[in-house]
Image (cartoon, rainbow, N blue to C red):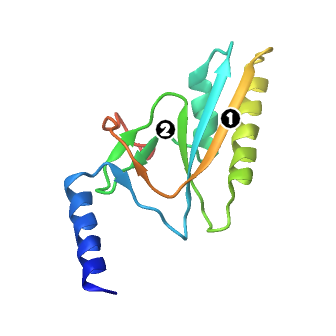
Amino acid sequence: MTIKTAELIMEFHKEALVYPHTTESSDKHPTFAVRVQLSNAELYDDLHKVMEKRGFYRTLLDSNGKVKDLPTAMYSHIAESEYLTCETVFGYASDAVNEHLDSTSQQDVGVEIFVSSLTGAWFDLKDAKQSHDD
């Protein structure tokens, strides 16, 4: 590693401490950002319960370990292994949405799901009202 590269790494590290609006990626436990949009739907609180039961949370940790609330209709999912793919996470989210729709007998609901592997993020989010461990 050159001196210039080492200096840049130190600058990035200092910046992360000053601006904790980032997440760190993990090769062993990939994180996914998931958006679930339901049109003509009711009972979103029930959806949140089903999603959480399946490992999807409406919060994430910043680089300083503070829990932050995600925007409306967004979830984070942390893989339990390094081999989880976006396609698999999409399937998990889709199953949760279908469980929610079946249990609440909602018909004619438009469903949109977006899943992305989160290798890092920059954000300005509010502190969480409560963590998913509460």
Q: CA distance from mark 2 to mark 1?
A: 15 Å
Q: Which mark is residue 113?
A: 1
Q: Identify which residue is drawn at 33% across, 39% down.
A: 124
Image side of residue 17 versus residue 58, left or right: left
Q: Which mark is residue 54?
A: none
Q: Quadrant of the N terminus?
A: bottom left
Q: Position of residue 64 (x, y in %)?
A: 28, 56
Q: Is residue 123 above or below residue 99?
A: below
Q: Quadrant of residue 42?
A: top right
State which mark lies toward you, 2 or 1: 1
Q: Is residue 30 above or below residue 48?
A: below
Q: Secondary structure beneath disc 2? A: loop
Classify 10 Å Cα crowding around label 2: few (below 14), some (14-19), many (20 and above). many
Image side of residue 16 versus residue 45, left or right: left
Nearest the camera: 70 or 21? 21
Q: Identify which residue is drawn at 59% across, 41% down.
A: 34
> As shown in the figure, which amino acid type bears the numbered disc 2?
Arg
> Nearer the N terminus, badge 2 or badge 1?
2
Q: Quadrant of residue 73?
A: top right
Q: Secondary structure beneath disc 1? A: strand
Q: Position of residue 46 (x, y in %)?
A: 61, 25
Image side of residue 34 versus residue 61, left or right: right
For label 2, the residue is 58
Image side of residue 98 versus residue 73, left or right: right
Q: Position of residue 97 (x, y in %)?
A: 71, 32
Classify 10 Å Cα crowding around label 1: few (below 14), some (14-19), many (20 and above). some
> As shown in the figure, which amino acid type bears the numbered disc 1?
Ile
